[in-house]
Image (cartoon, helix red, strand yellow):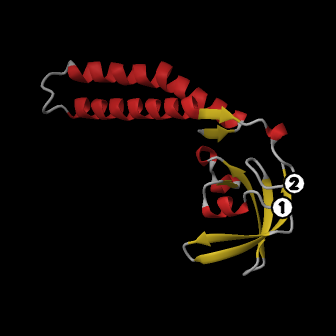
């Protein structure tokens, strides 16, 4: 089961609907047009249309599985005093004294540029359940990071 914010759930549902109602019919039309051009063994357009068909079907199935197993998170029931899903966490790397701020999200919402890290990432997993002032230790490829929680907001 995957937990998603309402916003991300709606984005995935919209992408799925677009693929089903717009992209897939266009791929089918392209495939029919390429197929009508004759010999399929020498037809690069046909091979490309088949590749796009497979890619589109694969993406549709992937998104359907996500939505089938997804649960939308009610932020009102999440703890406010501990790091949890959808928490904005500000922490200090004790080795470098650098402060960072990230939102803890599901793997399907992760976006480092937007400041969103997965709860399944080493840092996200280490922060989960911690309170302000506590030290989290994250096992990362370069070693162990010691992180002090500075603030938690929802």
| Residue 84 percent across, percent down from the top left | 76, 51
| Residue 137 percent across, percent down from the top left | 69, 71
Classify mark 1: residues with Cα within 10 Å, few (<14), some (14-19) or many (20+).
many
| Residue 18 percent across, percent down from the top left | 53, 25
Frontmost residue, 4 versus 60: 4
- SS of the residue under disc 1: loop
Question: Is 102 placed above or below 75 here?
Answer: below
| Residue 47 lies in quadrant | top left
Q: Is residue 59 left or right of residue 127?
A: left
Q: Are marks 2 and 1 in contact (CB under 8 Å)?
A: yes
Classify mark 2: residues with Cα within 10 Å, few (<14), some (14-19) or many (20+).
some
Question: Is 16 placed above or below 140 here?
Answer: above
- SS of the residue under disc 2: loop
Q: Residue furthest bottom?
A: 95
Q: Is residue 137 left or right of residue 54?
A: right
| Residue 39 lies in quadrant | top left
Return the residue at label 2: 81
| Residue 80 percent across, percent down from the top left | 86, 49
The residue positioned 80% from the left and 39% from the top of the image is 75
Q: Is residue 17 left or right of residue 134?
A: left
Frontmost residue, 29 versus 13: 13
Return the residue at label 1: 131
Frontmost residue, 129 versus 19: 129
Frontmost residue, 124 versus 46: 124
Question: Is 143 placed above or below 7 here?
Answer: below
The residue positioned 49% from the left and 26% from the top of the image is 19
């Amino acid at each position: 089961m995957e937990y998603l914010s309402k916003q991300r759930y709606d984005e995935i549902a919209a992408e799925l609907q677009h693929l089903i109602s717009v992209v897939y019919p266009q791929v089918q039309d392209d495939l029919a047009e390429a197929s009508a051009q004759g010999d399929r063994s020498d037809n690069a357009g046909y091979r490309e249309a088949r590749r796009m068909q497979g890619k589109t079907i694969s993406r549709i199935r992937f998104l359907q599985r996500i939505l089938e197993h997804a649960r939308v998170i009610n932020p009102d029931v999440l703890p406010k005093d501990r790091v949890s899903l959808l928490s904005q966490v500000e922490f200090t790397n004790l080795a470098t004294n650098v402060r960072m701020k990230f939102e803890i999200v599901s793997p399907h919402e992760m976006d480092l540029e937007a400041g969103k890290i997965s709860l399944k990432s080493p840092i996200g997993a280490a922060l989960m359940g911690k309170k302000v002032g506590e030290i989290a230790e994250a096992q990362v490829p370069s070693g162990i990071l010691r992180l002090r929680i500075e603030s938690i907001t929802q």
